Amino acid sequence: MTVIQVTTATKAYQVQLSDHGLTKIGQAVSAVWTPRQVALITDTNVGPHYAPAVTANLQAAGYRVTVLTIPAGEASKSWAQVERLTAMLSAAQFTRSDGILALGGGVVGDLAGFVAAIYLRGISLIQVPTSLLAQVDSSVGGKTAIDLPTGKNLIGSFYQPDLVLIDPATLTTLPARSLAEGYGEILKCAAIVGGDFWQLAGQITDLSALLAHAAALITASVQFKTQVVMADEKESDQRQLLNLGHTIGHAVELLGQGQWMHGEAVAIGLVQVCRLFEAHQLTAKGTAAQLAMRLHAVGLPTELPAALSPAKLIAAMQHDKKVHGDQLTWVYLQQIGTATFHQVPVANLMTWVAPILTK
Ligand SMILES: NC(=O)c1ccc[n+]([C@@H]2O[C@H](COP(=O)([O-])OP(=O)(O)OC[C@H]3O[C@@H](n4cnc5c(N)ncnc54)[C@H](O)[C@@H]3O)[C@@H](O)[C@H]2O)c1
Ligand SMILES: O=C(O)C(=O)C[C@@H](O)[C@H](O)[C@H](O)COP(=O)(O)O
Ligand SMILES: [Zn+2]
């Protein structure tokens, strides 16, 4: 088992990476939770694979388990699901001594994490991520969120879990498209870090290599993310680096209305931000092409959708949480291994983005 320690102002916890760790989940949970009621929140795809065995394992360890299932997909990061889940917790008399265990991808983790943060003003939370994207990124660091029609993750909180339990064996049931999108966030981290991590990510020449190297890629990504989160939990400074590719990515994801998965939209955002900053002579020439080549290897998209309206793209980008006052802070790469910030007045965005909008 690989253990990565996370210590923030609000919580100290372990990220445990253990192949087939789900078979011993009761034991792992017992190390951080006394016996209690547990709401196992999962989705309609993940639940049938893993919820029965996880429930039995937790029950054997002394927990009273209620399984709450949400429809799979981004649309579940909604007020409607928050209302539904909190009502179910209350009806089942969950108290402040009880807990939520999120079993699923980033959608389950973000939604269940937000419910844990607000129900009774906060009950305990364990993240058990089952998608590659959730294992390398969303389960760690405490960002929880639901969406609004105007933008991604616009309602949420920073709420750290008591434990993150990653079992790479769950990736064997993940559909190929979902496996590939995880590489979007991995390559984001590797491009920021450079060096050995960039070399490791370069070994991913297809989806089977991605699965074969999953444990090493998860370890490298989580080690990097936890360092950033520990230095800047609430994203007042360096944590914004983790948003590389997301200014365009989140806008594309929102405007696509379900056409793109998060990691796919991030892949587009990564290449486009590099192209944009190459045009402004702030990014080394050829960086976008290097990223695109690697993303294409696992079938990820990198081009802005042809039908995308520039006006809508600019409007969506203005809901980026990196807008402060009248300035948008872009995260960009000077070169592989060197990421930094550049502020652009919101009023100038259309002109600033023009180089990637004119074909
Ligand atoms: N909180 C954060 O720091 C953070 C970071 C990155 C992304 N996110 C958020 O995460 C979400 C994307 O997460 P995601 O890509 O995991 O999407 P997802 O949760 O929708 O999972 C992708 C698909 O795979 C299915 N699935 C998951 N694990 C499975 C398994 N082991 N076997 C079979 N099917 C499985 C899901 O049901 C879903 O259909 C977005 O909402 C994004 O905004 C949050
Ligand atoms: O953990 C972070 O910090 C990140 O930015 C990770 C991102 O990959 C993730 O998509 C995050 O949810 C985006 O955050 P947001 O604050 O831009 O909604
Ligand atoms: Zn992301």
Image: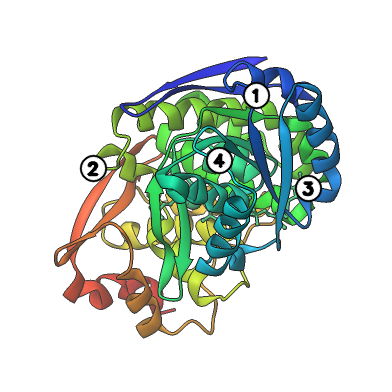
Closer-to-camera residue (45/69)? 69
Q: CA distance from mark 2 to mark 4?
A: 23 Å
Residue 189 in the image: above or below residue 77: above
Q: Amino acid at mark 3?
A: Leu
Q: Is residue 19 visible?
A: no
- Residue 132 x %, y %: 66, 42
| SS class, disc 1 | loop
Q: Is residue 62 above or below residue 324?
A: above
Tell me, yes or no, whether the two marked residues, 3 and 4, touch with CB atoms within 8 Å: no
Is 349 drawn above or below residue 336 in the view shown? below
| Label 4 SS | helix
Q: Going from the N terminus, do you reach mark 3 or mark 1 first?
A: 1
The residue to which callout 4 is attached is 186
What is the spatial separation of the Cα atoms under label 2 and label 1, in whole angstroms?
37 Å
Q: How many marks?
A: 4
What residue is disc 1 on? 35
Q: Which residue is mark 3?
A: 174
- Using the numbered discs, state the Cα–Cα distance from disc 3 to disc 1 in whole angstroms: 31 Å
Image-based side of 176 in relation to 192, left or right: right
Q: Residues within 10 Å of mark 1 (few under 14, many from 20)?
A: some
Of the numbered discs in the image, which one, if any, rests on residue 46? none
Q: Earlier in the sequence, mark 2 or mark 4?
A: 4
Residues packed near mark 2 inside 10 Å, few (<14), some (14 to 19) or many (20 plus): few
Numbered mark located on residue 236 in the image: 2
The tag earlier along the polypeptide, 2 or 1, is: 1
Horizontal and vertical percent position of residue 83 = 54, 64
In the image, what residue occupies the spot 34% across and 57% down? 278
In the image, the residue with mark 3 has its CB under 8 Å from the nearest atom of ligand 1: yes
Other-residue count near label 4 (Cα within 10 Å), few / some / many at <14 / 14–19 / ≥20: many
